Image (tube, rainbow, N blue to C red):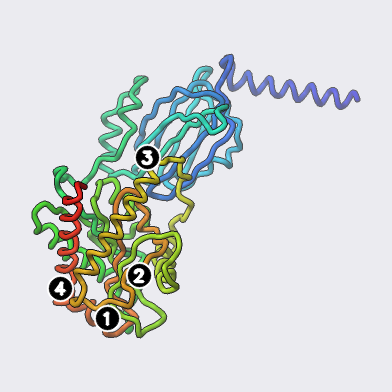
Amino acid sequence: MRVLRFAATAFALAILVSVSAFAPMAAADPLLAYGARIAGDEARTRIVIDMDRAPAFTVHYLDNPVRIVVDLPATAFGFPAGDLKPAGLFKDIRFGTMDADSARIVLTAKKPVKLVAAKVQADESGKGQRLVLDAEMLPAEQFSELVKKQSWTNGDTAEDVGPVEPTQKADPNTFLVAVDAGHGGIDAGATGTDGTTQEKDITLAFAKMLADKLNAQSGIKAFLTRDKDQYLTLSERVTIARQNHASLFISLHADTLKQKDIRGATVYTISDKASDRLAGEVADRENNSDQIAGAESQAQPAAVTDILMDLTRRETQAFSISLAQDVLSSFNGQISMINNPHRHAGFQVLTAPDVPSILLELGFLSNKEDEKLLLDPDWRQKVADRLTEAVKQYRVSIIANGG
Ligand SMILES: [Zn+2]
């Protein structure tokens, strides 16, 4: 008994020592952070911290390395550090007490980032509050501006949190099209029958041609998600389109199939369930792009229940289908297409909730005839012309419907 009592006393003493060493004037009633979660990828990452009360907080940015600093009042962090393991955009996460009245969370990022939202929400039970931090990748120049502009006085949070500025400066009446050349960099995509033709080169050359043709139209402006041989994750492609408020997103591909006799163009829109086995296989192969380059394929940030977002998603889906139909009618009789040329499957690159999106398989590199066409400048011109007509037709119908 005596030994036990001694042990208990020693334990109490140890606590006292650690408390007096690290928090000599602990705040009377610190906030309690009792849970934490992180989810997302290298384009968007969400951090949620469960707290017993609503915290006041401020946000700042530091460069070299890129960091987001979130300052909080005195806070007791009561969750295991493993619950906030670095993921997505962040390579290091630290949190702890600064002094008697303040605590800090430091998020070190892999690339320039910005909090596009930082808010406190009541949790479902109504008993606690959640600090929700939504980070997005940011063009490097915008990050430098952010660091330069900010002051370190309290109350400047609002300036430092908010949407990423579009890099595409277009007047609001311009119809902006994001043209996405599939694959790139370390991810070559499919290869042709003799092994020399690479999908990433075909998609880039075609994307440039299409963007030029769209830019020659009045009232339409196109931009490329990549304009060189560069790797982008699927989520980065979606995020670039969203940050620029694109009116449309067109992802271009030329994949291979096991069935070498299948040829012709296919237009894909998104759906939870694939329309058929072939569509499912194509989506699996395209979604594999992230794994090829070793990018994280984490679950997307858990959707906050948001009825408005659901409505947006449904509306966007209808617009995507309408664009796909415009492409098919423009191709009809002009460009060879596979049977049932409008198919759908769970393509990750088509997940923008607010940008109507299609994925176009121009043809299949597994088919010799298709490969010949894909390399033929005249055929490319013709397809790009038909696609431009489809975009024009779509735009006219949107304007006619007051969109
Ligand atoms: Zn592809």
Can see residue 383? yes
In primary-sequence order, the first of circles 4 and 3 is: 3
Crowding around mark 1 (Cα neighbors within 10 Å: few <14, some 14 to 19, many 20+) is: many
Question: Is the C-beta separation of discs 1 and 3 under 8 Å?
Answer: no
The residue closer to the viewer here, 49 or 321, is 321
The residue closer to the viewer here, 90 or 312, is 312
Q: Which mark is residue 189?
A: 2
Residue at which label 1 appears: 370
Q: Amino acid at mark 2?
A: Gly
Residue 32 quadrant: top right
Residue depth check, mark 2 versus mark 3: number of the one nearer the observer: 2
The residue closer to the viewer here, 192 or 63, is 192
Q: Amino acid at mark 1?
A: Asp
Label 2 sits on a secondary structure element that is loop
Q: Quadrant of ligand 1?
A: bottom left
Cα separation between marks 1 and 2:
16 Å
Cα separation between marks 2 and 3:
31 Å
Q: Which mark is residue 382?
A: 4
Cα separation between marks 4 and 1:
14 Å
Residue labelled 2 has its Cβ within 8 Å of some atom of ligand 1: yes
Residue labelled 3 has its Cβ within 8 Å of some atom of ligand 1: no
In primary-sequence order, the first of circles 4 and 2 is: 2
Cα separation between marks 4 and 2:
23 Å
Residue depth check, mark 1 versus mark 3: number of the one nearer the observer: 1
Question: Is the C-beta separation of discs 4 and 1 under 8 Å?
Answer: no
Residue at which label 3 appears: 66
In primary-sequence order, the first of circles 1 and 3 is: 3
In primary-sequence order, the first of circles 2 and 3 is: 3
Residue at the spot 39% in from the left edge and 78% down from the top edge: 257
